[in-house]
Structure formats: C-alpha cells, structure tokens
Image: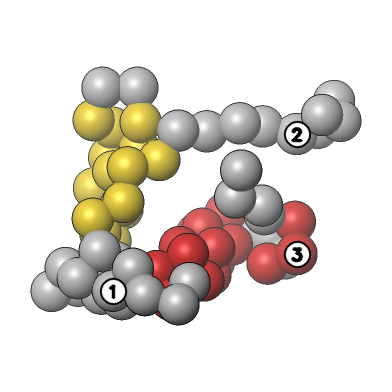
Amino acid sequence: MEPSDQLVAIRVQPRASRERIQGLRGEAIAIQLKEAPVDGAANAALLKLLAHHLGVPLSSIELV
C-alpha cells in the first residue's frame, strides 16, 4: 500500500429501493445499492457511488 492508500470496511445491501450511504454499522460503512449482485453490477455501482461522494476519480478506488 502507498502512504496515501486507505482501507475501509464496507457492508453492502444490494437490491435496495434506493442508493445511499447509511453510516457506520460496527466498524464498517453500510451502503445500500439498487443493483443486484450479478455480473459485477453491484460492485460497479459501489465504486461509482464512492467516487462521487468522495470527489475522486473512479480509477482511484479499488475493491480488495
């Protein structure tokens, strides 16, 4: 990891009625997504949502 890298735990609820960041659940950030966890759709939606809310390019976020 580079010095500027951050590792964040995220708990995703797919197939929700709307997309939103709910807040902390334990030590993870809870996020609701409309997309189903099929063919990477939920992962792509998660990356897009995080990039938008953090104000960073999509390419600067990675799921591990």
Direction from residue 59 to residue 11 in the image, left or right: left
Query: Is residue 19 visible in the rendered structure shown here?
Result: no
Between discs 2 and 1, the one toward the N terminus: 2
C-alpha span from label 3 to label 2 = 13 Å
Q: Which mark is residue 3?
A: none
Location of residue 15 by image quarter? bottom left
Q: Residue at x 13, y 74 (%)?
A: 17
For the residue carrying disc 2, how many other residues have a C-alpha within 10 Å: few (<14), some (14-19), or many (20+)? few
Between discs 3 and 1, the one toward the N terminus: 1
Residue 7 against residue 32 in the figure, above or below? above
Q: Residue at x 16, y 68 (%)?
A: 16
**SS at mark 3 in the image:** helix
For the residue carrying disc 1, how many other residues have a C-alpha within 10 Å: few (<14), some (14-19), or many (20+)? some
Query: Is residue 26 visible in the rendered structure shown here?
Result: yes
Residue closer to the observer: 15 or 5? 15
Q: Residue at x 48, y 72 (%)?
A: 40
For the residue carrying disc 3, how many other residues have a C-alpha within 10 Å: few (<14), some (14-19), or many (20+)? few
Q: Residue at x 75, y 56 (%)?
A: 60
* x and y percentages locating residue 26 in the rendered image: 26, 22
Direction from residue 55 to residue 52 in the image, left or right: left
Q: Which mark is residue 59?
A: 3
Direction from residue 51 to residue 24 in the image, left or right: left
Residue type marked 2:
Asp
Q: Which mark is residue 36?
A: 1
C-alpha span from label 3 to label 1 = 22 Å
Q: Which mark is residue 5?
A: 2
* x and y percentages locating residue 64 in the rendered image: 61, 43
**SS at mark 1 in the image:** loop
